[in-house]
Image: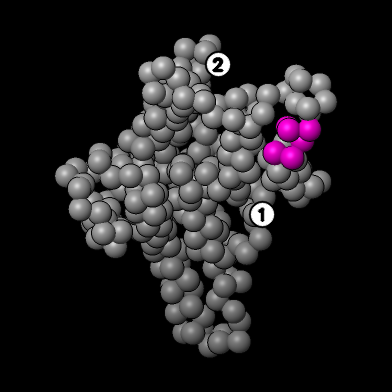
Amino acid sequence: MSLLLQRIVTALPLILLFIAPWAQAQEGILPAVTVTTGEDGSSRYSVTMQILILMTALSFLPAMVIMLTSFTRIIVVLSILRQAIGLQQTPSNQILIGISLFLSFFIMSPVFTQVYEQAVQPYMDAKINIEQAYEIGHQPLKQFMLSQTRVTDLNTFIEISGYQNINSVNDAPMQIIIPAFITSELKTAFQIGFMLFIPFLVIDLVVASILMAMGMMMLSPMIVSLPFKIMLFVLVDGWSLVMGTLANSFGG
């Protein structure tokens, strides 16, 4: 069902693009896909064009949620944690994705609030046009990504792109900030995952050494160490610590 909805959302821009001229010719109600220039030099899009842009943007919404928010760091850390404990399918992928999604909404809520108050609400009240809404709305998200992006990663992509007129990080365009942000998020996620992996690795080594000393080499250390790792994780209130660490790692 979700795949069907995704295909419908993806196909809607093309459907609107083809039916808009026909609807205008038949009824004279739906305006054509046009862009007009105002007296101040700004571009004004017809309602059909705005709907087309909106529906096209919605088709990219899953990728934006994954790559432009805190989702990447959270899901990678939780996946490494599950692997460190030794539970291959518990919690399931659906649970990890759900946890990551709602924790991302919690972390990103100040950014989303700024975007809504500064860009979406004025645009809905017809106080600004769609171009102004984009310019204002992407600034909070840009500042969030820059605050989590390492300067070395940003400089790497600036050098690759060949931009020469960037004097500060705020001058970097989004096509440079986004890959630099994703690279920094992956590095941070692996650093946090490494720190989480160490205590469970110590338990595995201790159990393996004890079994070797007892001559029980045919018994898998993973089977014996798994209850101890689960017990350790529960006793230290591991889920609360992990969630708190992830939330605090974004400087919230």
Say if mark 1 contacts mark 2, CB within 8 Å. Answer: no
The residue at the point 46 percent across, 33 percent down is 108
Report x, y in % for residue 89.
66, 60
Is residue 156 positioned above or below 13 on the image?
below
The answer to whether residue 116 is seen in the rendering is no
Quarter location, residue 191: bottom left
Which of the pair 16/97 is nearer the observer? Answer: 16
The residue at the point 53 percent across, 58 percent down is 79
The crowd level at tag 1 (other Cα within 10 Å; few <14, some 14-19, many 20+) is: few
Quarter location, residue 57: top right
Q: Which residue is mark 1?
A: 92
Question: Which residue type carries mark 2?
Answer: Met
**Which structural element holds mark 1?**
loop
Is residue 63 positioned above or below 191 on the image?
above
| Main secondary structure of the magenta stretch | helix
Which of the pair 1/174 is nearer the observer? Answer: 174
Q: Which residues are magenta?
A: 17-22
Which of the pair 29/115 is nearer the observer? Answer: 29
**Which structural element holds mark 2?**
helix
Report x, y in % for residue 7.
74, 48
The residue at the point 25 percent across, 41 percent down is 171
User: If you read the primary sequence from the N terminus, does the residue marked by circle 1 or circle 2 appear first?
Assistant: 1
Q: Quadrant of the C terminus?
A: top left
Q: Which residue is mark 2?
A: 124
Question: Which residue type carries mark 1?
Answer: Ser
Report x, y in % for residue 190.
40, 60
